[in-house]
Image: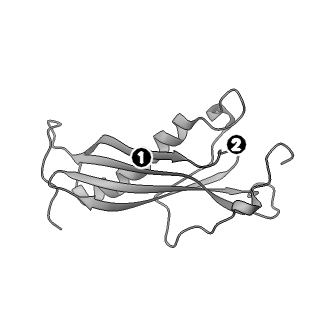
Amino acid sequence: MADIPDDSSLQVHLPEGQPVLRMVPMPANTNYAGDIFGGWIMSQVDMAGSIPAIRRAHGRVATVAVNSFVFKHPVFVGDLVSFYADIVKIGRTSITVDVAVYAQRGVREGGEEICIKVTEAVLTYVAIDNNRKPRAVPKD
């Protein structure tokens, strides 16, 4: 890990519970500087956020807004990246989800492992029917 900066001062613990998605980025996901593309992370965040939205909507959803997206720290090849997603608001047809992303570094080296929060985002999904038209979110 000679080319990866020391992030030990940023270390946090993973949230309680299981992530909705866990990935290891590969070299094909890097930009010219060797960091993971922001677009790759955004794509994974959208997938992670859609999982609780689909469950709550009992069916299809479509992303209608990325309310906020903050890249706090870079993600590197080989990081174990965990995506945690929680519903924060339910409207008549919409579901807003908060997604927090953590990178665990040092996993593949077998040495000391650190965990840092790398990204946070809020996305809004709309429940849709088979004709791709908005539908009411069931009252669970």
As helix, strand or loop, the secondary structure at mark 1 comes to: strand
**Residue 72: % across, % down:** 59, 49
Q: Is residue 17 above or below residue 6?
A: below
As helix, strand or loop, the secondary structure at mark 2 comes to: loop
The reply to whether callout 2 and callout 1 are in contact (CB within 8 Å) is no
Residue drawn at x 74%, y 62% is 9
| Color style of the picture | one colour
Q: Earlier in the sequence, mark 2 or mark 1?
A: 1
Look at discs 2 and 1 and give the one toward the viewer.
1
Residue drawn at x 31%, y 41% is 63
Outermost residue toward the top in this view:
32
> Which residue type does callout 2 highlight?
Val
Q: Nearer the viewer, residue 101 or 129?
A: 101
**Residue 137: % across, % down:** 16, 56
Outermost residue toward the right in this view:
2
**Circle 1 is placed at which residue position?**
68
For label 1, count other residues whose C-alpha is less than 10 Å away and answer few (under 14), some (14-19) or many (20+).
few
Q: How many marks?
A: 2
Residue drawn at x 35%, y 55% is 97
Outermost residue toward the bottom in this view:
16
Q: Nearer the viewer, residue 54 or 96?
A: 96
**Residue 78: % across, % down:** 70, 47
Residue drawn at x 76%, y 57% is 106
For label 2, count other residues whose C-alpha is less than 10 Å away and answer few (under 14), some (14-19) or many (20+).
some
**Circle 2 is placed at which residue position?**
77
Quarter containing the C terminus = bottom left
> Which residue type does callout 1 highlight?
Ser
Per the model, the C-alpha gap separating discs 2 and 1 is: 25 Å
Q: Does 42 sit left or right of 127 as displayed?
A: right
**Residue 87: % across, % down:** 33, 61
Point out which mark residue 121 bears: none
